[in-house]
Amino acid sequence: MNWDEVTKKLTAPLSPDAIKQPPKGKYGEYIDGLHAIREANRIFGHDGWSYRITRLEMVSRLTTAKPQVRVGYMATVEVTVDGVVREGSAVGSGMVAPDSEADAHESAIKEAETDAMKRALRTFGNTFGLALYDKDKANREVGYAPVESQIERIKLAVYAATTEAQVNALWVSEKPALSTMTEEDFEAAKGAFGGKSAHRHVGNLEGQKHRRTQRKDGMAQRCYLPGRSCAYRRAIPEKRLQGLHRGPACDP
């Protein structure tokens, strides 16, 4: 891993679009789990980081007068990036009617796991929410980072797309730019369009088994996780990538 390049991304300002406002009755802006996972995949690479739950414990359970069941879980998550290990802990809660108590446990576990993972990632830099911990908002490192190049713009756009229709629309709209790229940038663009997307949901609990299948129609891999759902964007079929006509590269 090129830590010089990684450090540049980690110290870049936190995008205002990633900041979420707290629910009614709570305080403190935050980033959500989806943003944290997407940024980890973008900065470290899909195979450049991992996390595991080192503690998951129910710490409270009570029945209210309504009646409702409320449970609380404590989770500790360990994040590893190229040998660097960071840890975060958090508590999650869930409250439902007694006949749906399992849903309360599920909600509490997910909240605790996600928040613990975010706290571990936060120590790496601004893009994981570290910037929000500066109490002086005027000094917060929040803002839009400049796009360095055309290929970076395209890769960011593909990365941000969340549906097959959006990916295909980008493929059509960016054809003029693709046709004038250098060979190196063109290959990078092919990798962005042809690769799989980031997880939409927080990953599986420790010990769960990944099962992957590959569809024949150009779809990217799908990951099936017991008790969790995650999705990948549709990959542009290789034959469409190969069929793109490019003119001569235009170097500045």
Image (cartoon, grey):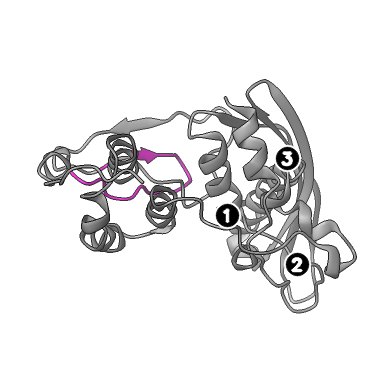
Residue 129 percent location from the top left of the image: 72, 54
- Which numbered disc, 1 or 3, marks the residue that appears first in the sequence? 1
Circle 3 packing at 10 Å, graded few (<14), some (14-19), many (20+), is: some
Element carrying mark 2: loop
Q: Residue 124 carries which label?
A: 3
Circle 1 packing at 10 Å, graded few (<14), some (14-19), many (20+), is: many
Circle 2 packing at 10 Å, graded few (<14), some (14-19), many (20+), is: some
The vertical placement of 29 against 33, above or below, is: below
Residue 214 percent location from the top left of the image: 23, 34
- Name the amino acid type tagged 1: His
Label 1, on which residue?
A: 35
- Marks 2 and 1, how far apart at CA: 14 Å
- Marks 3 and 2, how far apart at CA: 18 Å
Label 2, on which residue?
A: 29
| Residue situated furthest right in the rendering | 135
- Which numbered disc, 3 or 2, marks the residue that appears first in the sequence? 2
Q: In front: mark 1 or mark 3?
A: 3
Element carrying mark 1: helix
What segment carries the magenta color?
Answer: 220-237
In this image, 150 relative to 110: left or right? left
Residue 228 percent location from the top left of the image: 47, 46
| Residue situated furthest top in the rendering | 83
- Name the amino acid type tagged 3: Phe
Quick one: 33 or 239, which is closer to the camera?
239
